[in-house]
Amino acid sequence: MKLSSLKIYLAKIAFSQKGVYILIIAIFIAIFCLPIISSLANYHPAGNYYQKLQNLVRLKFKPQTKIMNIHITAYSSTPEQTDETPCIAASGYDLCKHNKENVVACNFLPFGTKVKFPELNPNKTYTVVDRMHERFNSRMDIWMTDKSKAKQFGVKYLKVEIYK
């Protein structure tokens, strides 16, 4: 029997019996693929290329910061300070449900804009979710949980960092 006919004969046997076929594939994987796969087990792609790419993106898409000094007041969810739905902000955000003092009302910034008041609390970020009366186009209102806290806050002239 010639070598080529022996290869054909072995191939016929391998393909005619599924068990042998699976065994041959398993042996092939064990011999050729497992060493490659196991060598990739400790591979961390966050090394050079991806880290450089992240740094590049971080530099290109750094949020624009605008700093202004404006008058800041405070309000709470009471009908005399708001409209007939005191808990619902102009954006649809439910102030009473979330009950966190991390939102502001502002007419000159779009909803979702993040702001900080470094002189109040440099680590706290506020989000624009509400609007004020149209006569207050150059001021911000911080939402507070109760009216007495809002009155105690009063009116302040503060530096505001606006992140767009």
Image (cartoon, helix red, strand yellow):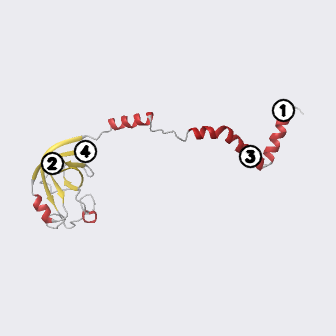
Residue that label 2 marks? 119
Q: Is residue 27 left or right of residue 34?
A: right
Q: Amino acid at mark 2?
A: Glu
**Disc marking residue 163:** 4
Residue that label 1 marks? 4
Q: Which of 44/162 is in front?
A: 44
Q: Amino acid at mark 1?
A: Ser
Give how far apart the Cα atoms at labels 3 and 4 are. 61 Å
Q: Amino acid at mark 4?
A: Tyr
Residue that label 3 marks? 23
Give how far apart the Cα atoms at labels 4 and 1 are. 73 Å
Q: Nearer the N terminus, badge 2 or badge 1?
A: 1
Instruction: Tell me the mark number nearer the camera, choosing from 4 and 2.
Output: 2
Q: Is residue 72 left or right of residue 46?
A: left
Give the percent coordinates (x, y) of residue 108.
19, 49
Q: Nearer the N terminus, badge 4 or badge 1?
A: 1
Give the percent coordinates (x, y) of residue 101.
22, 59
